Image (spheres, rainbow, N blue to C red):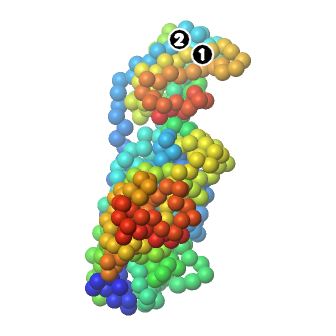
Amino acid sequence: MIDGETPNEIYYHIREGNFTILQGDNSLDFLNRITTNMIQKKTDGKLNLTLLCGASGRIEDSLEVIFSEEGVIVIGLSTNGEKIRQKLVQGKNWNERINVLNGDDPLTFLTIYGQQLTEIAKSFNLEINHDETQSWFEINSKLIRYNNTQPASIDLILQTESLGDFFDSGIETSLKISSINSWNKFCIDNSILQYNEIKSSPLPFECGLGHLIDPNKGCYPGQEIHARIESRGKQTKFITKFVANTQLQPGKYRSEDGKKIMITTVSIIEDKTYGIAIIPTHFLGKNEIRVNDNMLTKLHIKSF
Amino acid sequence: MGILGGDGFSLPIVNSNPIVSVSITVTDSALSQMENTLNNEEKTHCLIISAQSGGCSGYVYDMKIDEIPQDKEQFQILFFGNIKIFIHNGDSHLLNGIELDYKDSLMGGGFNITNPNASRECGCGQSFG
């Protein structure tokens, strides 16, 4: 149990990341010129994930695309939304009628998680369907999605200026703000990637996002590198979860045989560290890694 | 009302491509080929060179012969004899300094752009970054 938290509470966490809104008839074609897979226009709110990579094939941002009546909402994990939007604006052709809008401050993405979400879901008019997960619904100026995570969670995107009304509506009595430690544990348990996992610009295969590359798509920034890695099997790192019996912080470590270990996210509970790390494929199939030449510090590998 | 709607709710438009004064070089062979292509329509038509996102390296070139655009003030117009080359202000920082060449060859022939702003180019010659 995380200090100060109880299992029956419901927590919320305001997500970091960026919002870009594209408006105009060619918005989808425009986005598809640079993403690693073909985004299909889905008006049913179903999951639409893709990546933005540089010419070196490394991830610049991991994106979720939502189609709203008023535009295409692109949610990125990167905390540098300006850089992503500049890239988009610079790639606009002179005869494309597209507006790239900055939604970072006007929109807020929060996640509510806990054991008893039924009442909360009702207050959003959200029907919980355990068979059909991860579809966004647009209700009363909010985008809402139920997730079959452990514990269950509700993602919510709303106008930042209505955040006050949202918390004043009485819902705040049943919600508590999560600690970073608690949120990280939730993300680790549910294999939810955060900016921590992509901020060192890994290749998609290295952080478990290789499935977002479509080898049949044709040219996009980074495509040559991705095709070469796939055809020659040159993946050198992979992402994994771990548990250690000591307290560890995110950062670079060395295994006892000198290999680089990058710990990206941690949650420390009762002197144990639960975490996510990007490690060399050398360790594939192994159950534990000793780090920093310390016989006592072992990462017990768990599948991602 | 949707998430992006409502009274007083608006989102700032991002539009900050730097505009630079464009200068380009056109080789004699490229000029000669453009004259052939325009076929005495130089008064009403022009060559528009642009760049857009895509390709392996980040951006791809686009060239087309088209009627002279109505919103001329958005373009920089470069004159080479009777030929007018239009470059949109939004592309000026990407295309300033390019050299336009033409190779009359069965393999690898056609118009070719050399771009001093490009730190990398795709083998196909159409993408740069």
Which kind of residue does numbered mark 2 sit on?
Thr
Nearer to the camera, A53 or B126: A53
Q: What is the crowding at mark 1: few (fewer than 14 residues within 10 Å), some, or many (at least 20)?
A: some
Instruction: Answer yes or no: are tags 1 and 2 on the same subunit.
Output: yes
At x 45%, y 79%, the residue is: A153
> Could you tell whether B8 is left or right of B67 in the image?
left
Q: Is residue B75 visible?
A: no
**Distance Cα–Cα, label 1 vs label 2:** 7 Å
User: Which chain contains the residue that carries disc 2?
Assistant: B
> Could you tell whether B8 is left or right of B91 in the image?
left
> Could you tell whether A87 is left or right of A35 in the image?
left
Residue B102: image tag: 1
Name the residue carrying label 2.
B27
At x 39%, y 30%, the residue is: B93
Q: Earlier in the sequence, mark 1 or mark 2?
A: 2
- Callout 1 touching callout 2 (CB < 8 Å): yes
